[in-house]
Image: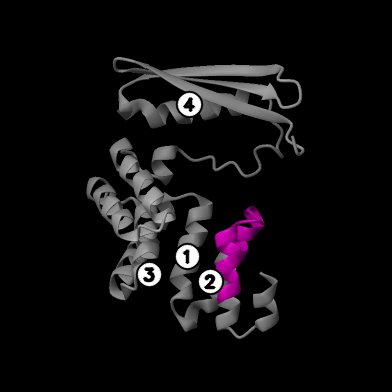
Amino acid sequence: MGGVESVLVGNYTRANSTFRINVTLQEASSGELIGSESVEGHGEKDFYAMVDELTRRIKENFELSEAQIATDIDEEVGKITTASPEAYKHYSLGRTYHLNGDYQRGIESMLKAVKIDPEFAMAYRSMASAYGNLGFGPAKKNARQKAFELRDRVSDRERFLIEGDYYWSSEKTLDKAVEAYSDLLELYPDDPIALTNLGGVYYNLEEWDRSLEQ
């Protein structure tokens, strides 16, 4: 399977207000069971805490190597997204609209998300991108500024993207944009957004050769 050594398979069940998440780690080549874990919670409010607990157990009990968890975020889900499952539902729907090119409906979903959780940085970043695609400059600037102010509430990948987008908006800070996108590519060398945007920044800096390399 293309160098994949193991596969994590998960599912969840619900009985009234009780949720149960089950995962198994299997050898990719043989399907042999390496380990299994499960967690239970009551109501959607417990869902993120369940995911965090399950993640902790997987790292402790499945004997994963340092290489296998090298890019692990190691932060609680609610702290780097939103603590509100309802807000995340709107965000997820908004991203679907966005990726399908329906930016207006994507924005509408993101506005619902930030109404529930005003500190949902990823939703502001998505709105900034959508506003930009629609040519709404002032709205893009406001959403980008809000995402930048809340960038400590996201994963490293999202933070570098937010910083890169923010610093790219001014000729005075293009060097910081290069630094942000380069830092992201150190973590994720094939990240398509970072590669594309870094090429764009180099183009603005008139560093043509470096722009073409991205």
Q: Residue at x 71, y 40 (%)?
A: 67
Mark 4 or mark 3: which is in front? 3
Do residues under tags 3 and 1 come within 8 Å of each other at their CB atoms?
A: no
Q: Is residue 188 magenta?
A: yes
Within-10-Å neighbours for mark 3: few <14, some 14–19, many 20+:
some
Q: Nearer the viewer, residue 146 or 44?
A: 44
Dot label at residue 163? 1
Q: CA distance from mark 1 to mark 2?
A: 7 Å
Taking the image as shown, residue 51 lies to the left or right of residue 85, namely right
- Where residue 190 appears, as percent x and y from the top left, is 65, 56
* Amino acid type of the residue that numbered disc 2 sits on in the rendered structure: Ala
Q: CA distance from mark 4 to mark 1?
A: 30 Å
- Mark 4 / mark 1, whichever is N-terminal: 4
Residue 166 lies, with reference to residue 153, above or below; the image says below
Dot label at residue 177? 2
Q: Nearer the viewer, residue 212 or 145?
A: 212
Is the magenta region chiefly helix, strand or loop? helix
Q: Which residues are magenta?
A: 182-200
